[in-house]
Image (spheres, coloured by chain):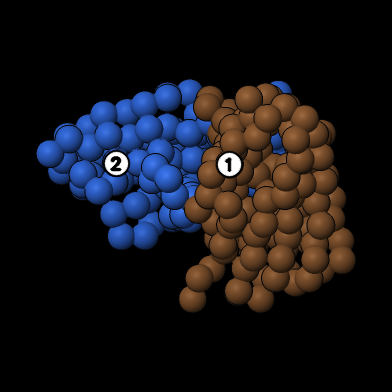
Amino acid sequence: NAGVTQTPKFQVLKTGQSMTLQCAQDMNHNSMYWYRQDPGMGLRLIYYSASEGTTDKGEVPNGYNVSRLNKREFSLRLESAAPSQTSVYFCASGTPGYTFGSGTRLTVV
Amino acid sequence: DQQVKQNSPSLSVQEGRISILNCDYTNSMFDYFLWYKKYPAEGPTFLISISSIKDKNEDGRFTVFLNKSAKHLSLHIVPSQPGDSAVYFCAAIQDGGTSYGKLTFGQGTILTVHP
């Protein structure tokens, strides 16, 4: 039982490049989330999806887009990466007490 | 506006002693609180939670206390073990049926337990 799987684990982008972070869960959860973790800031919610077909903004959505492809998959897209988006990104699914993936460490240079 | 605050960036304790991690919140609408534990290069893992209708919840070596009037919660680990060394995040949620599980996290406290 894999839980929440994130790909890639590491990525280096140049400013202005785009990329998509992938997330998949195998727990049949309705809700999925994207958070970013920055030093001294804790985890901050970027976007969430309460159920398949719906997405909504969290606390820090600027510069990001999301797609809930189906019940299992929730992707996060950076259209034009900026150094301020250097962070560790976590996907999660379920209800509070939910399960997190192992993260994607993204560096934008 | 940091609605959930962990004012101690780090805590160091001796093995076998008690670890007390603290968390304060400002939003009086929060009614469910959680603690997560995070090891390096891993995602956070859920540890323990408490509803606002309770003031204490216990699970093995871990106990969470909630003081609603002070808007303060704490996590007690007794006895502390070296394997408890990790970053601990407190989190809160306003569960009005429309929150969809959106958690607000504190900044985290690094706990180091020395053998």
The x and y percentages for residue B31 are 65, 48
Which amino acid, by three-letter code, is at mark 2?
Answer: Ser
Report the residue at 33% width, 35% height from top: B111
Other residues around mark 1 within 10 Å, as few (<14) / some (14–19) / many (≥20): some
Which amino acid, by three-letter code, is at mark 1?
Answer: Gln
What shade has chain A been given? Answer: brown
Q: Nearer the viewer, residue B26 or B107?
A: B107
B108 versus A66 height, above or below = above
Q: State left or right for residue B101 relative to residue B96.
A: left
* Residue A28 at least partly seen: yes
Q: State left or right for residue B49 relative to residue A34.
A: left
Q: Which element type, helix, strand or loop, lies under badge 2?
A: loop
Q: Are marks 1 and 2 in contact (CB under 8 Å)?
A: no
Query: Circle 1 sits on which residue?
Result: A11
Report the residue at 43% width, 40% height from top: B88
What is the quadrant of the C terminus of chain A in the image? top right
Q: Nearer the viewer, mark 1 or mark 2?
A: 1
The x and y percentages for residue B90 are 51, 41
Do tags 1 and 2 sit on the same chain?
no
The x and y percentages for residue A7 are 59, 55
A80 versus A31 height, above or below = above
Query: Circle 2 sits on which residue?
Result: B85
The x and y percentages for residue B104 are 65, 41
A58 versus B59 height, above or below = above
Q: Chain of mark 2?
A: B
What shade has chain B been given? Answer: blue
Q: How many badges with numbers are in the image?
A: 2
